[in-house]
């Protein structure tokens, strides 16, 4: 892809994000763009950095490691944030804590315990989101909403984790309107958790919305949208989303 297209895509994505925010009477500055760079080359990520992007999402640890530690992707002004958006296997917990600013995909107490232990060893407070499963698709991971309150209460006792919010991946629909009830539900869950003071502090973040449905997600309260194809092109991102 030529640089021109990448710039256009980024501008267009930001414009669509802010239009959706304004439709919902929200402040566009409250919504963060996480550019999902799985299968995207280091060269193209460099172009995205030069175009001003600073938050990137990856879904595989090995691939992410190459990119996070790459000299070509260093910037002198402003740090780059790396987000893990895909499922995390427990044997990769240590690397995940080493590499990522925010882990969106904490989907079990066991994983949280492991991350906490590694964070303690590395003397880090690891920021996390808890992934919630709102559909009954076999292929998706996440905590069911019935177990969410209990899980959050357990996790909040882990001193080296900072739970910042919730994440979800609704089923894929051609018509993004079909995803709206899932986004609404995640937002309602977060508000209820905050009302009940389950975690002892306020959960702010809602990571929801991808290329095909981020506008609806923003209308329903998303604070982070994870966007790959709309920025880097359909070609780049084919693998199944878990
Ligand atoms: C790939 C991926 C995205 C981005 O999906 P696009 O449709 O390319 O925007 C977002 N979230 C997760 C968890 C992903 O794996």
Image (cartoon, rainbow, N blue to C red):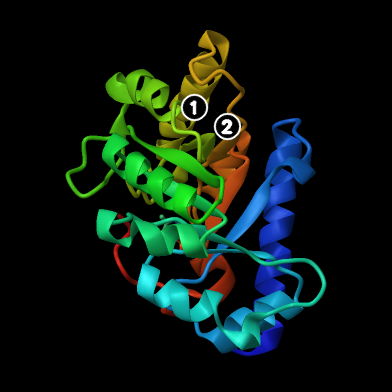
Name the quarter where the N terminus is drawn.
bottom right
Q: CA distance from mark 1 to mark 2?
A: 6 Å
Asked whether, in this view, residue 146 is left or right of residue 119, the answer is: left
**For mark 2, does the 10 Å Cα neighbourhood hold few (<14), some (14 to 19), or many (20 or more) residues?**
many
Mark 2 residue element: loop
Residue 139 seen by the camera? yes
State the residue position of label 2.
Answer: 220
Asked whether, in this view, residue 236 is left or right of residue 71, the answer is: left
Asked whether, in this view, residue 106 is left or right of residue 161, the answer is: left
Mark 1 residue element: helix
**For mark 1, does the 10 Å Cα neighbourhood hold few (<14), some (14 to 19), or many (20 or more) residues?**
some
State the residue position of label 1.
Answer: 184
Circles 1, 2 touching at the beta carbon (< 8 Å): yes
Q: Quadrant of residue 46?
A: bottom right
Q: Which residue is drawn at the image coordinates 33% and 58% (left, top)?
A: 241
Q: Quarter of the picture for ligand 1? A: bottom left
Identify the mark nearer the N-term, 1 or 2.
Answer: 1
- In this figure, what is the number of numbered marks? 2
Measured as percent of width and height from the top left, residue 146 is found at 28, 19
- Please, is residue 185 above or below residue 209 in the view? above
Measured as percent of width and height from the top left, residue 122 is found at 50, 56
Asked whether, in this view, residue 226 is left or right of residue 63, the answer is: right
Tag shown at residue 24: none
Q: Which residue is drawn at the image coordinates 70% and 76% (left, top)?
A: 49
Closest to the observer, 154 or 29:
154
Measured as percent of width and height from the top left, residue 37 is found at 50, 71
């Amino acid at each position: 892809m030529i640089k021109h297209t990448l710039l256009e895509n980024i501008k267009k994505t930001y414009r669509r994000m802010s239009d959706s925010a304004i439709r919902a009477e929200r402040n566009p500055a409250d919504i963060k763009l996480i550019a999902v760079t799985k299968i995207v080359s280091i060269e193209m990520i460099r172009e995205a950095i030069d175009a001003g992007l600073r938050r990137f999402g990856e879904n595989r640890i090995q691939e992410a490691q190459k990119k996070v530690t790459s000299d070509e992707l260093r910037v002198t002004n402003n740090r780059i944030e790396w987000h893990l958006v895909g499922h995390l296997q427990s044997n990769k917990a240590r690397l995940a804590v080493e590499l990522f600013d925010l882990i969106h995909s904490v989907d079990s107490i066991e994983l949280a315990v492991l991350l906490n232990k590694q964070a303690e060893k590395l003397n880090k407070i690891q920021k996390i989101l808890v992934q919630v499963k709102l559909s009954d698709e076999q292929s998706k991971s996440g905590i069911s909403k019935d177990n969410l309150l209990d899980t959050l209460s357990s996790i909040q006792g882990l001193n080296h984790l900072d739970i910042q919010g919730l994440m979800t991946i609704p089923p894929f629909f051609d018509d993004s309107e079909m995803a709206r009830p899932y986004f609404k539900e995640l937002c309602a869950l977060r508000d209820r958790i905050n009302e009940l003071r389950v975690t002892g502090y306020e959960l702010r973040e809602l990571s929801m919305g991808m290329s095909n449905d981020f506008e609806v997600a923003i209308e329903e309260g998303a604070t982070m949208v994870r966007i790959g194809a709309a920025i880097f092109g359909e070609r780049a991102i084919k693998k199944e989303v878990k």
